[in-house]
Amino acid sequence: EIKNDGNLIVAYNSETFLNKENIKVSSKRVNYYKSKKIINFNKDVTFNDLNNNIIINGDEIIYDINKEIINSVGNVVLNFSDKYIVKSKNLFFDRSKQIIFSDSKALITDDQKNSYLLEKNFKFDLLNNTIKANKAKITDKDYNKFYFENLMINLSNKHIAGKEIKIEFEKSYFGNEKNQPELKGKSAYSDDKNLKIYNAVFSTCNTNISVCRGW
């Protein structure tokens, strides 16, 4: 359907290919606002950014062609190179700056079975392979849990830095599955081999049932 003197084009059950941007999209409905260069895809949307190897699935995706910003409204799942899966709401992707960001909570899982629950204002920089978040929980492949504020992760070299850290180790780490080993600190830095905690307190016992000594 062509409306508003040709400024609005509506299509149904569409396979849309944007040749210049190298983007392919399937959806139940498409609204193309020609004068604004904005495309609104609705219902069962699969947005395939072939240049960046990103696939986004959601209920509604708005693409601002001039600004090169993709806005996924509502529940969304983003797949980046089959290495990272991002689940969130109201997710944005800036194609020109190669940044995924949102004010909503997001869960990122990687191909090594680590997960990153980002609770406040996260930014995933694809060019520099870094993640920033105001508050986050990391669960590694061994089921240890790391809680951070002001988190910064470099995914290339596995460097992690943050403040107000709390670590909940997998219970059997210290030989007694009834314990709840926990480590707290004001700040932390880690790489692939070492973890450094500053102003730290550590205990292996179950703090819910006894008074525990910290080291």
Image (tube, rainbow, N blue to C red):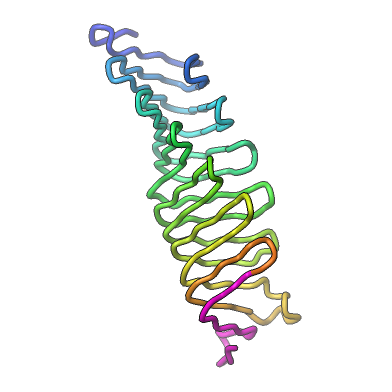
Our reading of the magenta stretch's main secondary structure is loop
* Residue 86: percent from left, percent from top: 53, 44
Question: Above or below — where is 150 with respect to 187?
Answer: above
Question: Above or below — where is 190 with respect to 85?
Answer: below
Q: Total number of numbered labels?
A: 0
Quadrant for residue 2, please give it. top left
* Residue 73: percent from left, percent from top: 39, 37
Image quarter where the N terminus lies is: top left
| Residue drawn at point x = 68 percent, y = 59 percent | 141
Question: Above or below — where is 149 with respect to 94?
Answer: below
* Left or right, residue 89 beside residue 174: left
* Residue 96: percent from left, percent from top: 44, 32
* Residue 147: percent from left, percent from top: 52, 67
| Residue drawn at point x = 60 percent, y = 51 percent | 155
Residue interval drawn in magenta = 195-215
Q: Is residue 6 magenta?
A: no
| Residue drawn at point x = 69 percent, y = 51 percent | 112
Question: Above or below — where is 74 with respect to 192?
Answer: above
Image quarter where the C terminus lies is: bottom right
Q: Nearer the viewer, residue 57 or 23?
A: 23
| Residue drawn at point x = 59 percent, y = 78 percent | 182
